[in-house]
Image: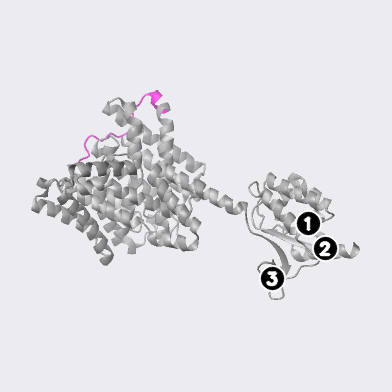
């Protein structure tokens, strides 16, 4: 798997990707212009703010990020959080609101840059593949729900998946739907689903968007309630640091931390999900730096916090994009489009854009992976389902946190009750093996070799002690030596070593010698620090099974 920062990817560019990247950039441009305008309005800022922010943030991520496909810029969740934070603080003053939004983005960027410098990217490693699969499915369902108003003409007002559904159901029942709008929106989604896999070299999303604009113009569908995008421009963009009061910094530090956590969670989950699809790797710490750079850049143009967009990313992938050149292409085309083709952009029907989002969302739901999890292990399937449900019920941040917590609990249940074995020698294969796996294996009378397949720590200390006693009690003839094979015990804590000390006391009271083999150097250091290393004695710690067996046989001859 390849892993390069965006600038290095571009410096070592493979020209075979050029056609797909240019097509992907062109297609994403057609999609993102109205999208970021909507997100800017959602954040409580003028539409043109989103346009300049997307140009800056996409360009900076393309140079700093480690993902080949991730699209960074205005995003619905961070836009909603921005509005929720700033509305009560701005007191109706649009200039103060814009300055606070920029300060919020600056703080999010500083948090991200600091996390990158401190190398806190290991946090992203807590997100397992079932969490990724479930997360993407949950995001896809939220994306579809967010477009219900666009593709049906029904007024939808809500800040969550459940609120969107409730609002849609209530208003659709009371006022009905706009059939021309729904036909156009769902028709676009259907065409994309049918045509895209059949014509992989054609920019189907772009073609369908242009056709939908043509249909609206030819048949005069605006008279039947089909709405189009408003005019766009770069006028009124503020460049430079936000002008705010000193007290505003304290007001925004905690909300900025929350937005940073949501944004990074979204970034790393989406980036890792697409990295699997492109056979590449994500550098967690580099993603902090890239996210920080994008947010600081957004702040310097009077913007608001940004994160990643799964919908833009999947559209880029579906259009043939393979590197971040598509992001630079899209950024350049946004500038050109706003300056030269604002009339064409304003003709895009909102229903068609909603259909494009629905198409992109459907591609994010990987039914095959859910089936694979089901056939592999039911617990991992349930973990994926819990991630999906968590995202839908508690929104992205809390849903992912709940799924990670469940993942950690599930891991603890496995290491708290790991596999263990009494070992013997078999005529069929060399070495010492689990007696349950080789029923014909034999033991040396009086010698019990016991293996515990897990780090020894607080969660399994009691279990370790109980299984040691059980292995000793079930030995026939009675055990004279009890050897703990430490091959699987790669890590210990003080609680685990206390349990080993209890085993030593039990053996001593029963006249049994406790010995160890395959003790790793790091574990030996901890044994000595604890004190049990001295009580067992280094002369009772052996590098291999044969040396332990030889020592026992020599001891047995003397005793």
Mark closest to the chain's N terminus, 2 or 3: 3
Q: Nearer the viewer, residue 179 or 195?
A: 179
Q: Which residues are magenta?
A: 231-249
Q: Residue furthest front?
A: 173
357 drawn magenta: no
Crowding at mark 1 (Cα within 10 Å: few <14, some 14-19, many 20+)? many
Crowding at mark 3 (Cα within 10 Å: few <14, some 14-19, many 20+)? few
Kindly identify which numbered label has been placed on residue 515.
Answer: 1
What residue appears at the point 31 percent right and 51 percent down from the top-left corner?
Answer: 312
Residue 278 lies, in percent from the top left, at 40, 60
Instruction: Check whether the beta carbons of the residues at disc 1 and disc 2 lie within 8 A of each other.
Output: yes
Q: Residue furthest bottom?
A: 428
Residue 501 lies, in percent from the top left, at 76, 48
Mark 2 or 3: the one toward you = 3
Residue 463 lies, in percent from the top left, at 67, 51
The residue at which mark 3 appears reads as 439
243 drawn magenta: yes
The residue at which mark 2 appears reads as 552
Q: Is residue 61 above or below residue 452?
A: above
Residue 52 lies, in percent from the top left, at 28, 41
On the image, which quarter does residue 293 sit in?
top left
């Amino acid at each position: 798997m390849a892993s390069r920062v965006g600038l290095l990817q571009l410096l070592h560019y493979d020209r075979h990707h050029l056609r797909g990247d240019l097509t992907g950039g062109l297609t994403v441009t057609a999609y993102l212009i109205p999208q970021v305008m909507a997100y800017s309005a959602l954040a409580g800022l003028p539409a043109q703010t989103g346009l300049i922010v997307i140009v800056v943030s996409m360009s900076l991520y393309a140079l700093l990020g480690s993902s080949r496909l991730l699209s960074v810029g205005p995003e619905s969740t961070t836009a909603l959080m921005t509005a929720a934070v700033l509305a009560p603080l701005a007191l109706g003053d649009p200039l103060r609101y814009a300055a606070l939004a920029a300060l919020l983005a600056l703080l999010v960027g500083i948090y991200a840059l600091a996390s990158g410098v401190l190398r806190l990217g290991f946090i992203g490693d807590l997100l397992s593949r079932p969490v990724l699969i479930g997360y993407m499915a949950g995001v896809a369902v939220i994306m579809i729900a967010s477009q219900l108003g666009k593709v049906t003409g029904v007024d939808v007002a809500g800040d969550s998946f459940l609120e969107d559904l409730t609002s849609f159901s209530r208003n659709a029942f009371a006022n009905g739907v706009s059939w021309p709008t729904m036909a156009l929106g769902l028709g676009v989604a259907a065409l994309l689903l049918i045509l895209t896999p059949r014509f992989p070299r054609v920019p189907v999303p772009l073609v369908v968007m242009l056709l939908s604009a043509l249909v609206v113009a030819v048949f005069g569908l605006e008279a039947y309630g089909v709405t189009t995008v408003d005019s766009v421009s770069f006028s009124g963009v503020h460049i430079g640091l936000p002008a705010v009061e000193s007290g505003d910094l304290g007001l925004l530090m905690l909300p900025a931390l929350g937005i940073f956590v949501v944004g990074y969670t979204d970034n790393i989950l989406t980036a890792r999900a697409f990295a699997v699809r492109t056979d590449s790797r994500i550098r967690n710490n580099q993603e902090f730096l890239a996210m920080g750079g994008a947010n600081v850049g957004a702040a310097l143009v009077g913007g608001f916090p940004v994160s990643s967009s799964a919908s833009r990313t999947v559209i880029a992938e579906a259009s043939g994009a393979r590197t971040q050149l598509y992001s630079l292409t899209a950024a350049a085309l946004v500038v050109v489009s706003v300056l030269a083709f604002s009339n064409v952009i304003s003709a895009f029907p909102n229903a068609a854009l909603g259909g494009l989002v629905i198409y992109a969302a459907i591609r994010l739901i990987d039914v095959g992976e859910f089936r694979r999890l089901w056939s592999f292990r039911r617990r991992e399937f349930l973990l994926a389902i819990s991630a999906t449900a968590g995202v839908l019920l508690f929104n992205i941040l809390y849903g992912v946190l709940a799924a990670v917590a469940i993942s950690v609990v599930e891991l603890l249940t496995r290491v708290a009750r790991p596999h263990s074995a009494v070992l013997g020698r078999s005529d069929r294969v060399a070495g010492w093996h689990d007696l349950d796996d080789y029923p014909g294996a034999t033991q040396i009378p009086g010698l019990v070799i016991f293996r515990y397949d897990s780090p020894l720590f607080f969660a399994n200390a009691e279990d370790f002690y109980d299984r040691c006693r059980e292995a000793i009690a079930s030995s026939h003839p009675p055990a004279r030596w009890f050897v703990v094979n430490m091959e699987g015990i790669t890590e210990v804590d003080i609680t685990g070593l206390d349990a080993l000390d209890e085993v030593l006391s039990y053996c001593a009271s029963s006249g049994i010698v406790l010995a160890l083999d395959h003790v790793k150097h790091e574990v030996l250091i901890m044994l000595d620090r604890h004190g049990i290393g001295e009580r067992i004695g280094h002369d009772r710690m052996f590098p291999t099974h044969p040396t332990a067996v030889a020592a026992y046989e020599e001891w047995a001859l003397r005793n």
